[in-house]
Image (cartoon, rainbow, N blue to C red):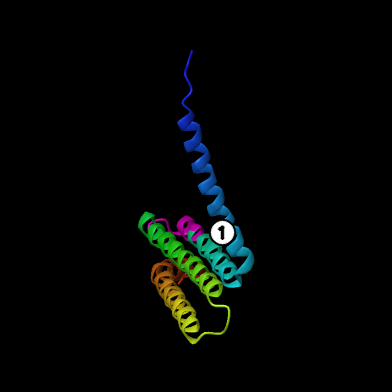
Amino acid sequence: MAIRNPNKKKMFFKLRNKFANAFRGVYTAVKEESSLIIHIIVSIAVIGLGIWLQREVPSEFGYLQWTIVLLTIGSVIGFELINTMVENFVDLLSFEYNIKAKKIKDICAAATLINSILAIAIGLLIMLPPLVNVIKIYLKI
């Protein structure tokens, strides 16, 4: 007869609760932040374009390009979640208008903006050359 280890059961429930909390946080952020929804929609469009490019010109859009695109998407969404967290934390601590609280929020928003602009540049650098080649193939240039 096998002896059950109660610690394994506790570990499983702790792990399950950690994932449940993380998914609840994602749900809350998506529900409350319109900019996060925009990032997710753009990310889905970029992934769709990547799938199409990989089917059309597999030699030009491979594992390395996918790795960079997915890391960039993760970075942008991660920055947006951190920005949302900092804004909510500042709101929790400061009940009235505070110029320092505004500075903190503005700097976090600037970090997210810079990250998003760099993500666009990375996306163009990676996806534009294969996209141009696919257009040339279709137009027979």
Which residue is the site of mark 1?
A: 26
Q: Residue furthest top?
A: 1
Residue in the foreground of this view, choosing between 39 and 15: 15
Residue 110: % across, % down = 45, 80
Q: Residue at x 54, y 45 (%)?
A: 17
Kind of element beneath mark 1: helix
Number of labelled discs? Answer: 1
Residue in the foreground of this view, choosing between 105 and 69: 105
SS majority, magenta: helix
| In the displayed structure image, the side of residue 47 where residue 37 appears, left or right | right
| In the displayed structure image, the side of residue 126 where residue 93 appears, left or right | right
**Amino acid type, label 1:** Val
Residue 116: % across, % down = 46, 74
Residue 21: % across, % down = 55, 52
The span picked out in magenta is 51-60
Q: Could you classify mark 1 by the number of other residues whose Cα lies within 10 Å: few (under 14), some (14-19), or many (20 or more)? A: some
